[in-house]
Amino acid sequence: MKKIAIIGAGISGLFFANLLEKDKFCSYKIFEKKNSLNLNDGYGIQLSANSVKILNTIGFQKINANDLCLPKKVNFFDAKSSKKICEINISQFNNINNRYTTLKRSKLIEFLLKNIPPEKIIYDSDIIDIKNQNRISLLLRGKQTEEFDYLVAADGVYSKTKQILFKKEGLPEYFKSIAIRGKITNFENSDISIYLGPNFHFVIYPINQSKEFNFISIIRKNLIEEEMLNTDLFKNSNFVEKLLNQISLKSKLNLIEKIDGIKCFPIFVSKKIQVPSSKNIFFTGDAFYSFPPSFAQGASQSIESANELFQNLNSNSSNYYKKRIIKTKQINFRSKLNHFTFHVSNPFNIFLRNIFLKYLSKNKKFLENYLGKIYKN
């Protein structure tokens, strides 16, 4: 039986392991650099129907209904006035079994961990080097070496695997934006709400049936390299408070009083699509390509890419990267277009943007092409 090394115990790596547990055509180990996985993290994720359909193949439909929400619409608002611009009915891309879903990321991780034997996850295991001749040889922290037939890198946007294989070209780039994340309780809207402002937007959506809501704001911000590398800066209460005030003053909502558990971090994205020359090394999820977060497909694509890779390996196919590149380009284009559209600042451009949003939100052909191609396929 061939052996697979999975690097990273995030959504993509754990889902891939679940598929291997279900259809045992290969043995595997998961190498996770952290000492443990945080199952108390309260921030949310969105799963479109494409990824829910895939998750249902491993029993996701049995997850506790109280831990999920099924929003039917995306509502767009002007941040300054809170006036509604338009709405998009995302339930049109659902079917009875596969519906757009929001939940805490930790709940999905907890679900994915249930089917994986604990001994198959090796914590506190950082990769130092990769050698690839007839088989892949991993040099781990402590100079421990293990050999495998395949390497699946699912170690996120800051992928150590990608840095080892591609050197500086494997590093992500700063997207000139900062994210503020937090939690809101008892928000009035049970669907997804997007508030658009000049050079920022924020999104509020429910993550369970206990009236908890996820808050995430993306703010355009130029930083010098020294600031980007200073992790303490993003933990500095004055820096975070200044950013929050920046958007709160341009919003009718009293965000400062509403948001709890605030965290701040710079947004990094992939520079370009990179495919390893070795035919037994694969990247999934954010390790393959990390998108700007304005299309909410990060978690869904982590699941979808892991599923595509599993199907390819199981059938001895070799078109994983070909298919993944096509989908990646589609989503990257939409993510960057959304980011630009959401952040326009000139009053006349905002006026035109809102007119287009009202028109396009009702145009079935556009919605089927822009959202349906991604949400259903």
Image: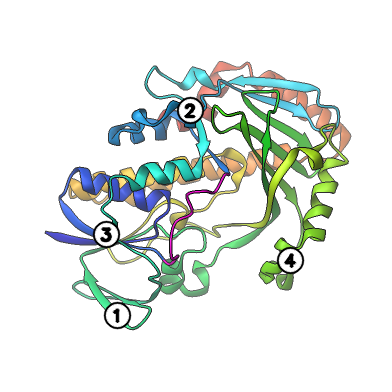
Give me the C-alpha separation between circle 4 and circle 3.
Answer: 36 Å
Please tell me which of labels 3 and 2 falls first in the chain.
Answer: 2
**On the image, numbered disc 1 is attached to which residue?**
144
Q: What label does residue 233 carry, if any?
A: 4
Is residue 339 left or right of 61 when viewed as pictured?
right
- In percent of width and height, residue 341 lies at 71, 37
At x 43%, y 28%, the residue is 49
**On the image, numbered disc 2 is attached to which residue?**
66
User: Which corner quadrant holds the N terminus?
Assistant: bottom left
Residue nearest the viewer, comparing 353 with 299? 299
| Residue that sits furthest to the left in the current view | 1
At x 54%, y 58%, the residue is 270
- In percent of width and height, residue 182 lies at 67, 45
Q: Are marks 4 and 3 in contact (CB under 8 Å)?
A: no
Give me the C-alpha separation between circle 3 and circle 2.
Answer: 30 Å
Please tell me which of labels 1 and 3 falls first in the chain.
Answer: 3
Give me the C-alpha separation between circle 1 and circle 4.
Answer: 35 Å
- At label 4, counting other C-alpha atoms closer than 10 Å, the crowd grade (few under 14, some 14-19, many 20 or more) is some
- In percent of width and height, residue 16 lies at 31, 49
Please tell me which of labels 4 and 3 falls first in the chain.
Answer: 3
Please tell me which of labels 2 and 4 falls first in the chain.
Answer: 2
Colour style of the rendered protein structure: rainbow
Please tell me which of labels 1 and 4 falls first in the chain.
Answer: 1
At x 20%, y 65%, the residue is 149
